[in-house]
Image: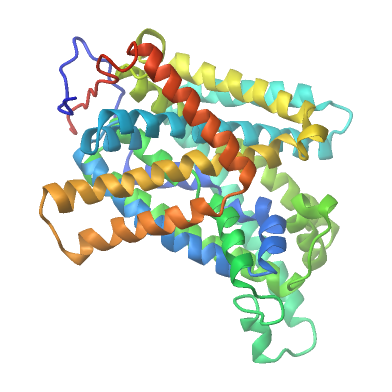
Amino acid sequence: MSTAPLPVENPAHLRRGLKLWNLIIIGIIIIQPTAPMGIYGVVSNKGGGHVVTAILIAMVAMLFTAISYGRMARIYPSAGSAYTYVGQEISPSMGYLTGWSMVMDYVLNPLICLAFCAKAAMNIAPAIPFVIWCIAFAALFSFLNLRGVKTTARVDEWLCAVMVAAVVVFLGAVTRYVFGMSPHAPSFFIRPFYNPETFSQGGLFRATSVAVLTYIGFDGISTLSEEAENPRKNILYATVLVCLITGVLSGLEVYAAQLVWGSKAFASETVESAFAMISGVAGGRWLFHTINLVLLIANVGSGMGSQMAAARLLFGMGRGEALPKKFFGAIEPKRGIPRNNVLAVGVFALVGALVLEASASRLGGGAYEIGAQLLNFGAFIAFMGVNLASFVHYCVRGKQWTISHVLPSVLGFVICFFIWLNLSPAAKVVGTVWVLVGMLYGAYRTKGFKSELVKFDVPDGE
């Protein structure tokens, strides 16, 4: 099958309007400045308290992968992101399966944000049931995205400011708490990185496979390539900077939390609110409620941003006919957005959150916990695919066998593959079923793969 871009009659195009600063803010909001707070208890229990070490190992893997994403965005400034990169450099069939795997990741992110927002809101107004809160937040996410990408960017800037302010308040409370105690030996400040009493290599790797959720969503920046100014440069800068900023900020947050809590395990019923509990220890009841409210705000921003990124991925796949083009490849002319996809993702997130929550007792966890366990499967298939596509383009075809080109793509692939192997069995089973469904759909569309599976309409960069 030919991998050359095919001409498309009257192709639909998104509108450019996002500067480098907008891209960085959107990326940080999708990930959340408070990203490690929600998963802190799970990572701590799995890694024997070595949360900061797991966060930093995950950052290394994501930085290598971010470089590959940015470099491929220079070549293909397309809303299809990894779907386009893998399809153009390796094969259309592999690109299709990569895109199909990404769909699982991208649509689950708004779902888990929706579920978290509903749960956090019930802590404030418990009389309002889960289903009503879900409907309200699904409508809010969709409404803001339907207003256009510039509106989303402005809202993101305010949300980012609120979350950063909350992180600063938390760090200040921890500093006062720690130095208000009796004097500490130097080993006290090193123990969050390595505690010989609780360290195990297997536990650290299992913790890292969860800690990487801190960074999930950074690749959403590449789906905005057709709405970014100077995408061949700004997408690379924004992707790498978002990973670096997130890693440093997240590492600082969990380091402070570990100084307060140490390596003690959390009970199963308190694992999701672990960070809020630590905040209460460091700053009192008011800080507990403040962090709960900020996490609610953070997930509003993340849900809105991830829904936007999912809509752009579906648009790229629809335009390339990997999905029904009439629906998924359409652009609403007034605001220049893929309206059908925004609404489709919103409906899926709402229905999925309600179904998972209704099945919580049978599945062994709520909608947020179950969705988070499944999300990494598709994400890491995409990450490995992009690293491989970057290696093929620059090293195999471009003959650029330099350390700066070989090292990021090879190490990014190897580390992502290793983390993927350490995902939970449930995530692997459900993810495999999802991929098989995608293969069956591809076979149906092509009458047994007898015709071309996808087409790639890659627009000009500028």
- The correct choice, above or below, for 438 with respect to 160 in the image is above
If the image is split into quadrants, where does the C terminus sit? top left
- Which image quarter is the N terminus in? top left
Say which quarter of the image contains residue 312.
top left
Residue 278 in view here: yes
Judge left or right: residue 243 versus residue 130. Answer: left
183 left or right, relative to 247:
right
Residue at the far right in the pictured view:
127
**Residue 387 percent coordinates (x, y):** 32, 49
Q: Nearer the viewer, residue 337 or 325?
A: 325
x then y, percent, for residue 368: 69, 38
| Residue 429 at x, y percent in the picture | 59, 38
Considering depth in this image, is 22 or 241 the residue closer to the camera?
A: 241
Q: Quadrant of residue 373?
A: top right
Coloring scheme of the render? rainbow
At a point 84% along the width and 50% down the height, the residue shown is 269
- In this view of the protein, can residue 17 be seen by the observer? no
**281 lies left or right of 263:** right
Q: Residue furthest top?
A: 326
- Expressed as whole percent of the image width and height from the top left, the position of residue 265 reads 78, 65
Task: From the viewer's perspective, tell me whether residue 197 is left or right of residue 59.
Answer: right
Figure check: 433 above or below 183: above
Residue depicted at 61% across the width and 60% down the height: 207
